[in-house]
Image: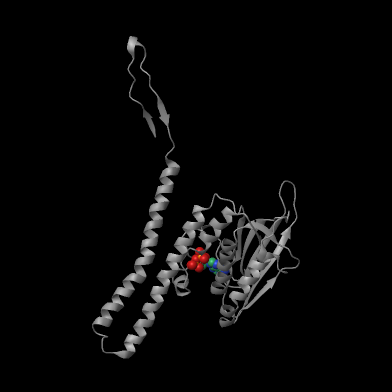
Amino acid sequence: QIGALPPADTPGGGQPNVVLFLRDLTSARRLEAMRVDFVANASHELRTPLASLSGFIETLQGPARDDPRAREQFLGIMRTQAQRMTRLIDDLLSLSRIELREHVPPTQIVCLKRIARQMVEEKAPLAAERGIALTLDAPEPPYSVLGDRDELLRVVENLVENALKYGGSGGLVAVSLGREEASGNRPPQLTLSVRDAGPGIAPEHIPRLTERFYRVDTASSRQQGGTGLGLAIVKHALNRHRGRFVIESEVGQGTTMRVILPEHRTGDQIEAPDMRPV
Ligand code: ADP
């Protein structure tokens, strides 16, 4: 944008004072377009289950009023739709909370191994339901990072859940921790990888997976209870942690999603829950 202030009064007949101001609106416009897109997508995602709920309510008040079997079936579907809306609102709130804090560095000393173990234990029933062997490999403790425990739990939960949801049934999902020693200016880093042996992801989708509401296959994501926000949450949480997120996938072979975080080594103030033996 280019503009000019109105000429100032110039007593004495001198040159008028003209001030030019230059401002680049491209990034402001892009941000505004992203915001509008986001609101449109979120509204659409909420409207779909809401429309379905309204339809079933009408049917229950009308044609299905005296049909106990139809009532039972429709109430089950309505419950699923209501759960879907709840999940979506929870994810929208998580994402906005993480974004609000994105510029505030986290300060808890968190053990990544403990986070990984908690998630592997929590997701064991889902893995068993799908006939998937869910394993954890973390050779030597400790795996300390400066972080926010809840956000890191959420990151690992989203990756493990995705591997269980999209990694095909009957296979293996392996969570592993590793350490990369310092090199040059780079401090030592910890890695947490979640590998599945599922159908994999075609290369053209990979750069877009962390966009809000981007899915490779919308129907399959919805059927699995996905909101399309899981990897956007991962990306923003890792921005806050000064971490990196790497996706490697080969169609027909499987996918590895890797989180890389700076290791915390001073070990001066360890929070109580993480002092228990690993
Ligand atoms: P969703 O809620 O749909 O799971 P995510 O943001 O977590 O949303 O993931 C975005 C999309 O990335 C998913 O819809 C799915 O298509 C794809 N995806 C994520 N993880 C995997 C994986 N391990 N294997 C194959 N596809 C995956």
Quadrant for residue 117, please give it.
bottom right
Could you tell me residue 47's position as x and y percent? 34, 66
In the shown orientation, is residue 267 left or right of residue 48? right
Q: Identify the image's colour scheme: rainbow, by chain, secondary structure or one colour.
A: one colour
Quadrant for residue 153, please give it.
bottom right
Q: Residue furthest top?
A: 12
132 shown above or below 36: below
* Residue drawn at point x = 26 percent, y = 78 percent: 58
**Any part of residue 54 in sight:** yes
Could you tell me residue 232's position as x and y percent? 51, 59
Could you tell me residue 5's position as x and y percent? 35, 26
Please state, as top left, top right, bottom left or bottom right, where the C terminus lies in the image: bottom right
Q: 212 or 54: nearer the eye?
A: 54
Quadrant for residue 82, please give it.
bottom left
* Residue drawn at point x = 63 percent, y = 67 percent: 115
Could you tell me residue 192's position as x and y percent? 66, 63
In the shown orientation, is residue 208 left or right of residue 177? left
145 shown above or below 21: below
Please state, as top left, top right, bottom left or bottom right, where the N terminus lies in the image: top left
In the shown orientation, is residue 129 left or right of residue 112? left
* Residue drawn at point x = 28 percent, y = 82 percent: 60
Tally the numbered discs: 0
**Any part of residue 213 in sight:** no
Q: Residue furthest front?
A: 272
* Residue drawn at point x = 63 percent, y = 71 percent: 118
